[in-house]
Amino acid sequence: MSIRTNILMRVYLAFGLILLFAAAVVIQLCRVQFVQGKKWKAMATTLSTRYQTVEAARGNIFAVDMSLLATSVPEYELHMDMLAPGISDDDVFNEKVDSLAMKLAQLYGDKSEREYSRMLRDARKDGERYELIRRKVTHKELLQIRKFPIFSMGKYKGGLIVVEQNRRVLPFRTLASRTIGYKNDNVKNAVGLEGAYASYINGESGKRLMQRMAGGTWMPVNNGDDEIEPKDGADIISTIDVNFQDVAEDVLKAQLDSTGADHGCVVLMEVATGEIRAIANFTKNKQGQYEEKLNYAISDAADPGSTFKLATYMTLFDQHKIDTNTMINGDGGKYKIPKGPMISDVEDYNFLMTAKKAFEESSNVAAAKFVYNNYYNNPQEFTDKLYSYHLNERLGLQISGEGTPVVKNPKSRTWNINYTLPEMAYGYEMKITPLQMLTLYNAVANNGKMIAPIFVKEIRRLGNTVEQFQARVINEKVCSDATLGKMRSLLEGVIKEGNAKSLFKNALYTAAGKTGTAQIANGSKGYGGDKKTYQTSFAGYFPAKNPKYSMIVVINHPTKGSYLAAKVAGPVFKKIADRVYASDMGMNQATPMHYVGNTNLPQIKRGNVKALKQVYTKLGVKPLYAANNAASNGVDTSNGIAFEDVSYKSGVVPQVKGMGLSDALYVLGNAGYKVVARGSGMVANQSVTAGSIIPKGSKIIIELQ
């Protein structure tokens, strides 16, 4: 084979392979385009576009008077498409970009006009389709920005891209912040009302189609068909009263600061409805300042101390073990339970006294003796009655975090008849939260009806009620009416004659309540050790005779001054009650007097005096003669009705207001005038004023009603 032939063979082979490769490429292109086209298009779409969740605006939380406690404020992030249709022409962009830069510099002042201009021009040069202009833009600023050069060209032409976000704000800042709560995606258990009613408040999320741009950024695709608008959340109407909440927080914080206490709480509840009007909780931080960290009122289950004596005495009375005048020896404030603990009182002068006096002076010795002596042989009878008050059960609150109460019974693992029974009598060997304790006091104020407290009264969507809530009845009657009367008398006695009598000395209203001072266990050392800490509390209601509000105050570990409840927790109760009483106009008004029968004096028509005298005589009413105005002429009308005789003079228009039709016609006719009457009843108006001198025969129009 010649060299020429060999070369040609190689050329033909190479050319053939090229043709074969080209044919394979064409075939593969056709396969990709037509056979697998749908598959690859779908894959490309998923890589360059995606749907982004758009959060709905969360619903508002309102106070009971519709003041805003929490709301969502729209906040915007602004981007710009530098290749938008309206500015595709460089001349248009260059003509207006400096004006836009000047406006942005004037509005925000964070950059100079030149810096803004350079930023926009560089983004244009790079062909940015999603250039960040500004974060955290308010709605008011957005309205201004839409009018700026270039952006005023419209949504698509001007290239302005607005990404809306929602920011949660509390208009009253820290007021009731722990009760309002917050949303935190990293916290599993919901916090406060925000968490408990998240399913209502959150609304329904929408979706927005996003396209991937160069550099990995994602830009919204302005296609209405591919977007689902979010549905805003429902509104929550809470039971909180902003004014009462403010008072409770101020008073509690001031007392915590003056006593150097570790933490404390206050709950104010409306007696009849169970609605929580105020709830404040403060903890001392490392800097010595007080802030809301934990909701102690609903979560802190601890020994209640002497406030529990309400349940103790109510049980003793209702089971007819003792009466208010039953005598007990206080043993000077020291008594050793046989094979049990030493019971001590704060005061050492308690000797022979009545049960009423023992309660008013908060004698631990008396309470322990009464319970130990009456229930030693049958302790189950005592604990069963306590369980009938549901003190061993959670209240089932509308917000999470409620502490679990512990009220022992003879079957409990740690039960000891010589220790547990007498110590339960004055509030130890158990765990109850402040709100659970308040619920029992509220039942006494509410004529024995125990109801579970509520924090939310209504849910609304777009102004329409979705759901309403009322307090759940726990126990229709916690005790007999006789026992109820005794307990209310004892609670009033604490303030009138007992250890809290100094609190309400000069008050304009009456109150009822009970102090409680409990020693706090010191870890493994128990109640022993050199350093003792105390929890002080005061629970009660006001006004005493017709209670509208119940309240509990708990202050933990005061370190300055007294540790006694009457001097630590009691003043907080008093100050808040004073402010509430002064603010609630429906409560501080005198009770209206209601009389039986018709007490109004008979209404009379002016006219025939003889007929009037005859009517008065039949009714047994003494007629008193008077001038035109009995009061101004010094006529005493306390023993009868003042009236005047009707006189008239020819040619002078007489006074006929207050007369019936026949009398008016008679008087005006005798005076020489023609009368046109309209309506029926008594004369309300006459066309010519009485005393006017007009010719006889003139027409006078009278209107009757």
Image (cartoon, rainbow, N blue to C red):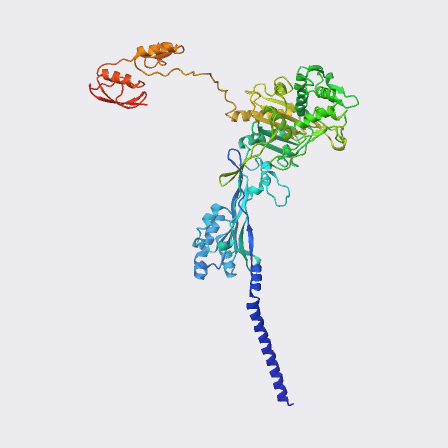
On the image, the x and y values in percent for residue 662 come to 28, 17
Question: Would you place residue 52 above or below residue 488 in this image?
Answer: below
Q: List the single residue furthest toward the front.
A: 618
On the image, the x and y values in percent for residue 426 come to 70, 24
Q: Residue at x 46, y 16 (%)?
A: 596
On the image, the x and y values in percent for residue 79 come to 51, 54
Q: List the single residue furthest toward the right.
A: 339
Quadrant of residue 684 in the image?
A: top left
Q: Is residue 385 left or right of residue 268?
A: right
Say how many tags the image has.
0
- The foreground one among 590 and 311 is 311
Say if residue 652 shows up in the picture.
no
- The foreground one among 231 and 352 is 231
Q: Quadrant of the N terminus?
A: bottom right
Q: Is residue 91 left or right of residue 190?
A: left
Quadrant of residue 620 in the image?
A: top left
- The foreground one among 212 and 544 is 544
On the image, the x and y values in percent for residue 559 come to 68, 28
Q: List the single residue furthest toward the bottom.
A: 2
Question: Would you place residue 652 above or below residue 580 in this image?
Answer: above
Q: Quadrant of the C terminus?
A: top left
Say if residue 385 shows up in the picture.
yes
Quadrant of residue 677 in the image?
A: top left
Q: Is residue 284 left or right of residue 691?
A: right
